[in-house]
Amino acid sequence: MRKAHKRWGLGATLVLGAGTLLAMATPTAASAAPSAPSVSNPPCTISQQQVISTGHSHGIGGVIVAAGTSSTCQDPSAQSARQALSRSTPPPPEPAFNGTPPLIFHGSPPGANCFFQPCEEGKVMMTQQTGPLIITPIFWVPAGHTDTAAYERILLTYLAEVAVSSGQRTNVFSVDNEYFGNNGQIHYNIRLGSVVYDSSPLPANGCTVAPNDTSGIYVDGTGYNACLDDLQLQAEVNSVSAARGLPHNLSHIFVLFLPKHVESCFNPGSSTSTAGGQACTINHQPTAAYCAYHSESTTSAVYANMPFPVYQSPVGFTCGSDARFPVIETPNNNPDADTEVSPTSHELNESITDPDTETGWYDSSGFENGDECAYIFGATNGSPGHLYNQTFFGLHYLTQQEFSNNVFNASGGTAGCVDGQAFE
């Protein structure tokens, strides 16, 4: 039985019936009357609570919910913020966090929160017991699909610098040090494993591409020509790891970067209906929901689904910094890679603190450490259009902040998102 069908039952606070999922997209000014996204009048927001709860019910965690772009969101406060930014004034105030912190450890007693398998019994990654976390990036680029050498190089450089910086306190990965599991305290210790370039063909579509989603998705006006469901992504991770003899355990994570023009959805079947808890990458349908997520496969492989980034989209939703700023911030002059860096950081940090998505760290609303700070960047440096907040060996990146329980508690519940332990 596929994992998604076994993962119902995290409790009434996390599980949504199919009837309540019929409208994940909601206008900011009309929360009492949700509506589905449309091409002509896209809403400002997608319900983060609903998407995260839906993901949990499928055994999927750390769902980065797509945001409304600054050019389509009609919220008056956002309009004022854009006007301020256009005058090169300081960025608008950001929320202190998104969910209902503090983060709570759900692994005590062991097994108490296990509603499905595999269950890690409250164990986390990057402890003395697990050893260093080995990141295996997989760039799946079949014939007829593309990314670019520059895209891959920037992402790999970022991951390599995150690894070399292990033990330092000046980036978001150091914030994980304050959390623990039943297998010990987390210590920032990362290694970049072998990079996999996979040109094997895509399987037959597991989910459908709606006719109006074949265009108008990406900033260049193009759209999807294939759709893969979560089980198919798990199969790719299994194939790659088996071919290379890579183990499935809490010492390894597989970061699967999908090529451009590939839609992904939680479930097989339709991408146009939210029935059964369906959710997909940004599209023109009511299922438009996410930018990336992490999970643990039926074979105990910890993995992250990293679709090709959508930003400045004609749909009106984004995975990028244009949710906060008037333009995509690109410190490395590559908007695709610079956008993908932040969700990569998000999913890695959440996998470390909640690898099985049920017995790790998340708040009373199901928000994990990355969810609490999604699209919250804090203070930035650089010039508009090239802003950054993370620096590794002289190279700059813009990533969302990560959540610190220590800061939340010390501030009396008024703060929590930080750039690193040095900023606590």
Image (cartoon, rainbow, N blue to C red):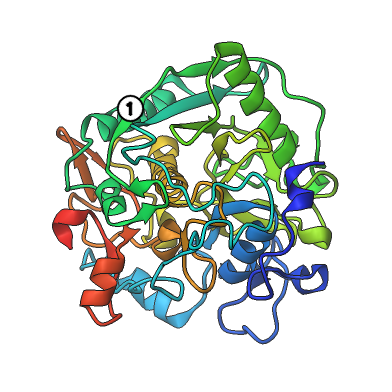
Question: Residue beneath label 1, please?
Answer: 191
User: Badge 1: how crowded within 10 Å, few (<14), some, or many (20+)?
Assistant: many
Task: State the image quarter where residue 323 is shown.
Answer: bottom left
Amino acid bearing label 1 = Arg
Task: State the image quarter where residue 286 is shown.
Answer: bottom right
- Say if 122 sits above or below 263 in the image: below
Q: Is residue 201 left or right of residue 389?
A: right
Residue 27 or residue 13, whichever sits in front: 13
Coordinates of residue 215 in the picture (x, y in percent):
70, 43
Coordinates of residue 82 in the picture (x, y in percent):
36, 69
For the point 52% across and 57% down, which residue is it? 110
Residue 379 or residue 298, whichever sits in front: 298
For the point 40% across and 46% down, which residue is it? 183
Residue 205 or residue 11, whichever sits in front: 11
Please, what secondary structure does the residue beneath circle 1 have?
strand
Quadrant location of the C terminus in the rendered image: bottom left
Coordinates of residue 294 in the picture (x, y in percent):
55, 45
Coordinates of residue 313 in the picture (x, y in percent):
56, 51
For the point 61% across and 12% down, which residue is it? 243
